[in-house]
Amino acid sequence: MSEQRIEVTRWIAADPASIFDVLRDPHGHVAIDSSGMLMDADGEPVEGVGDRFTVHMDREALGDRPLGRYDVQVVITVYEPDVEIAWTIEGQVRPIIGHVYGYRLEPAEDGTRVTSYYDWSDIHPEWAARDIFPVIHPNSLRATLGILARTVQKD
């Protein structure tokens, strides 16, 4: 973990394609979210860089900022089927923040090694000056990987 990037890794008993199917689906994001902020989503599973979908958020779950409910656009920035997916968030705040969330998948014996990451190293300078990052704790990424494992595990 660097000063501006968090990475957590977990082995999951599922093949990369099954995991990637969850990660490219807007409803998959909601289903595996451990933060409690993602309430629902609209859109189709993404198929490439530039694709986007809407997520209905509730920041009250974190208890840090009184933002209530709001919508964001998830914009795909990396898309390599069964290998890596990443996205940034576009919401109502300007300038756009520029933080990135993503997953890397590596085939492993009887499953997949999944790395979840959160990177704010290239955020807009105005947001960097506010010194509010990271918004998500490494334990949240770990917990989301646990929910992902439960969601896709082999019988």
Image (cartoon, rainbow, N blue to C red):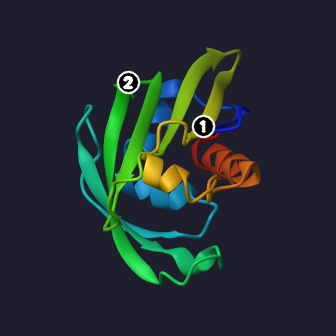
Residue occupying image coordinates x 64% and y 56%: 136
Q: Secondary structure at mark 1?
A: strand
Q: Position of residue 33 (x, y in %)?
A: 57, 59
Q: Mark 2: few, some, or many residues within 10 Å (few <14, many ≥20)?
A: some
Numbered disc in front, either 2 or 1:
1
The N terminus lies in which quarter of the figure?
A: top right
Q: Position of residue 3 (x, y in %)?
A: 70, 37
Q: Along the horizontal axis of the image, is 49 left or right of 56?
A: left
- The image quadrant that residue 91 belongs to is bottom left
Residue 44, numbered label: none
Q: Along the horizontal axis of the image, is 120 left or right of 17?
A: right
Q: Position of residue 96 (x, y in %)?
A: 34, 54
Residue occupying image coordinates x 25% and y 57%: 43
The C terminus lies in which quarter of the figure?
A: top right
Give whichever of discs 2 and 1 has the lower sequence position.
2
Toward the viewer: 116 or 145?
116
Mark 1 sits on what residue?
117
- The image quadrant that residue 129 belongs to is bottom right
Q: Position of residue 16 (x, y in %)?
A: 52, 26
Residue occupying image coordinates x 41% and y 52%: 97
Q: Is residue 113 above or below residue 109?
A: below
The amino acid sitting under disc 1 is Tyr
Q: Mark 1: few, some, or many residues within 10 Å (few <14, many ≥20)?
A: some
Q: Secondary structure at mark 2?
A: loop
Q: CA distance from mark 2 to mark 1?
A: 17 Å
Residue occupying image coordinates x 59% and y 49%: 151
The amino acid sitting under disc 2 is Pro
Q: How many labels, in total?
A: 2
Toward the viewer: 143 or 137?
137
Mark 2 sits on what residue?
81
Toward the viewer: 63 or 47?
63
Q: Is residue 92 above or below residue 107?
A: below
